[in-house]
Image (cartoon, rainbow, N blue to C red):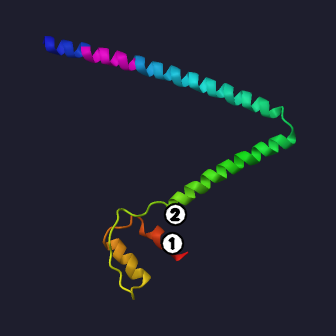
């Protein structure tokens, strides 16, 4: 019976510790949100004081940055690593493209065959 009481006390202590840790985490997240809000507000007010030309330059720079990130993402989707591992394959001189793709697919060389076909056809 005393073993069950001790387990109950331990479980209560763990529950109290978890509540304290979750409360601390909540406070840290709330403070981070307040700091982020104040930073964004100060950034917004400083941009409001700028002239039209500088605002336009900032807007174009931000758009250029986001488009570069988007293009990098598209590049990695289509031209990223599609090969599982290196193989030595014997391809006959007269084999068609479909036969080569079938050979690569059968040996497990490619992760995504459809993307390989799409890029190879271009």
Q: Name the residue: 35% across, 85% down.
A: 92
Q: Which residues are magenta?
A: 10-19
Quarter assignment of residue 9: top left
Q: Name the residue: 42% across, 85% down.
A: 96
Question: How much space separates mark 2 and mark 1, taking CA atoms?
Answer: 9 Å
Residue at the disc numbered 1: 118
| Residue 59 to residue 33: above or below | below
Instruction: Identify the secondary structure beneath mark 2.
Output: helix
Residue at the disc numbered 2: 78
Q: Position of residue 67 (x, y in %)?
A: 66, 53
| Residue 12 to residue 68: above or below | above
| Residue 82 to residue 14: above or below | below
**Tag 2–tag 1 contact (CB < 8 Å):** yes
Q: Position of residue 114 (x, y in %)?
A: 45, 70
Q: Is residue 29 shown left or right of residue 11?
A: right
Q: Residues within 10 Å of mark 1 (few under 14, many from 20)?
A: few
Assign the C terminus to one quadrant of the image: bottom right
């Amino acid at each position: 019976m005393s073993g069950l009481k001790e387990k109950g006390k331990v479980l209560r202590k763990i529950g109290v510790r978890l509540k304290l840790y979750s409360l601390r985490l909540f406070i840290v997240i709330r403070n981070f949100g307040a700091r982020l809000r104040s930073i964004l507000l100060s950034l917004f007010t400083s941009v409001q004081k700028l002239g039209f030309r500088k605002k336009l330059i900032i807007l174009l720079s931000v758009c250029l940055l986001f488009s570069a990130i988007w293009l990098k993402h598209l590049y990695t989707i289509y031209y990223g690593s599609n090969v599982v591992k290196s193989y030595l394959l014997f391809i006959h001189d007269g084999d068609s493209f479909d036969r080569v793709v079938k050979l690569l697919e059968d040996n497990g060389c490619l992760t995504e065959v459809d993307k390989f076909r799409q890029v190879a056809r271009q």
